Every structure is written in structure tokens, then in C-alpha cells.
Image (spheres, rainbow, N blue to C red):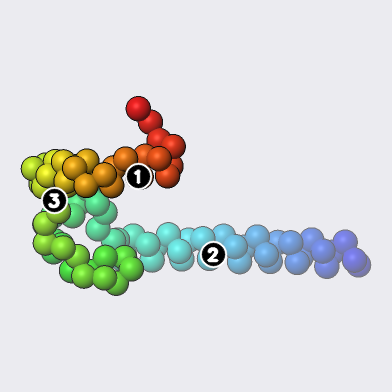
Amino acid sequence: MKKALIIAGGLLCAFTWQAHAQDAATESTAQAQPTAADAVGGQPSTTSMSGAPVKAQGLTRADVYQQLVQSQKSGESARLQELFKGGN
């Protein structure tokens, strides 16, 4: 009697699992989400992941170079290099 109940319970679980798997497959095809390869255009985000506003444009190479020259002139670069015992 126990064997029959265990077998019947196992078959019931297998059939239920099979039916659920088929339902999930039909739902996913009916509501296909666009993928990155299909995406066209879009709007750039106005906030970062932390919620802070996003700057319209980053620094240019010239801006970064000017900051480097300024930090070298002010000694900030040397202080940071000494603080972190960094490189060259």
C-alpha cells in the first residue's frame, strides 16, 4: 500500500511539473521582452544608479591635463604620492 501511494505521489508530481513547465514556456514566448540586440535608440539616464544627477559631459583630455599640471605645480601630486607611496 505504501509503495502504491509513493508511486502515485511521484507520478502526480511529475505530471504537475510537466504541465507547469509547458505553461511557463508559452507565457515567455507570448510576452517576449526586447533584448539588447533588438533595442534601438533610447533615452540616456538623467540620474546615476545612486540617484545623483548625471553630468551632461565628462572632462576632456585637455581638462584632465590641466588638472595634472595644476596638481604638480601645487605639490598635491607629490603629497599624494608620498601618502600612498606610489609609483615612479
**Mark 2 in CB contact with mark 1 (< 8 angstroms):** no
**Alpha-carbon neighbours of circle 3 within 10 Å: few (<14), some, or many (≥20)?**
few
Marks 1 and 3, the one that precedes in the sequence: 3
Going from the N terminus, do you reach mark 2 or mark 1 first? Answer: 2
Amino acid of disc 1 = Arg
Mark 2 packing: few (<14 Cα in 10 Å), some, or many (20+)?
few
Residue 11's mark?
Answer: none
Q: Nearer the viewer, residue 65 or 69?
A: 69
Give the mark nearer the N terminus: 3 vs 2.
2
Please state, as top left, top right, bottom left or bottom right, where the C terminus lies in the image.
top left
Residue 64 makes an appearance in the image? no
Q: Residue at x 31, y 65 (%)?
A: 49
Closer mark to the observer between disc 1 and disc 3: 1
| Residue at position x 33%, y 68% in the image | 50
x, y (%) of residue 5? 83, 67
Q: Where is mark 1, residue-wise? A: 79
Residue at the extreme top:
88
What is the C-alpha distance between the residues marked 2 and 1? 68 Å
Q: Which image quadrant for residue 87? A: top left
Q: CA distance from mark 3 to mark 2?
A: 57 Å
Label 3 sits on residue: 59
From the viewer's side, name the closer residue of 26 and 8: 26
- The front one of 71 and 54 is 71
Horizontal side of 6 relative to 31 (left or right) equals right
In the image, residue 77 sits, relative to residue 53, either above or below, namely: above
Where is residue 47? Give x, y as percent: 23, 69
Amino acid identity at mark 3: Leu
Q: Nearer the viewer, residue 73 or 1?
A: 73
Check disc 3 and report its element: helix, strand or loop. Answer: loop
